[in-house]
Amino acid sequence: MLDAGDNTKKMTLIVTKGTLDWAYPPFILGTTAAAMDVEVTMFFTFYGLQLLKKDLDLKVSTLGNPAMQMPMGGMHMSMPNIMPMIPGVDRMTTTMMKNLIKKKGVASIEDLREAAVDLEIKMIACQMTLDLFEIDKSELIDEIEIGGAASWMEEAASSDINLYL
Amino acid sequence: MADQVLDAKGLNCPLPILKTKKALKGMTSGQVLEVMATDPGSIADMTAFCNQTGNELMSQSNEGDVYTFEIKVS
């Protein structure tokens, strides 16, 4: 981080979701804030912890997401909730999304996470979630800290912006 | 005129900002970075970035779909 002068703004993000689509808001906001000299802490808990895995295998599901409309041949295709129950549909939707991401020049989550490391964002993995889902620390990238709610709270108490995503 | 040129064409939010930040990091005070982007959102974002970081947005222009920004390092 840059000089931690008195005017340095701070932000914390609580990252709770682990799907390909919902991985974007925290990493976009986090890296952009850090690029704008904001000191950023990201606390990864529950499904958000998936975003710290060394090997990312993120998927997108249409289930419970009636707002999802995929552009297709100049039109938009809605994704009824019955769709993800059909085997292979979530995989297909994920592939479609990844192709769109590439085509539109949108960063991959891997790229944004690498930027987060470069920008010295403090990333905290939730110890309780590691225990709960039996995830070994060795499955996660090295550039993180392990902590609990109190670790987030300490940062949040002195931050200007705190977001739950 | 620019000391360094950054081609961020074809990249979408937030990549032009992240790459701008990375380029500025390797430059010294008073130097000028020229950024070219095609993301229409970069017009508002580059201004906000400069306001927040204290670097000076000397000029912005566009030719067709390409937006060009000149940023002076603070």
Image: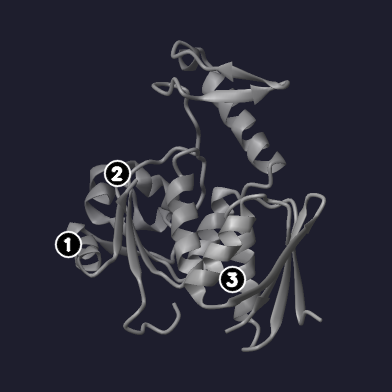
Q: Residue A5 carries which label?
A: none
- The amino acid type found where label 3 is placed reads Lys
Q: Residue at x 61, y 51 (%)?
A: B41
Looking at the picture, tell me which residue is in the foreground, B53 or A108: B53
Give the tally of numbered discs. Answer: 3
Q: Which of marks 3 and 2 is in front?
A: 3
Marks 1/3: CA–CA distance: 32 Å
Q: Is residue A75 left or right of residue A88?
A: right
Are there few (<14), some (14-19), or many (20+) residues within 10 Å of tag 2? Answer: some
Q: Which colour scheme is used?
A: one colour
- Residue corresponding to mark 2: A46
Residue appearing at x 46%, y 24% in the figure: A67
Tell whether label 2 touches label 3 (CB within 8 Å).
Answer: no
Q: Where is residue A122 in the image (x, y as percent from the top left)?
A: 37, 67
Which residue in the structure is indicated by mark 1? A150
Q: Nearer the viewer, residue A135 or B62?
A: B62
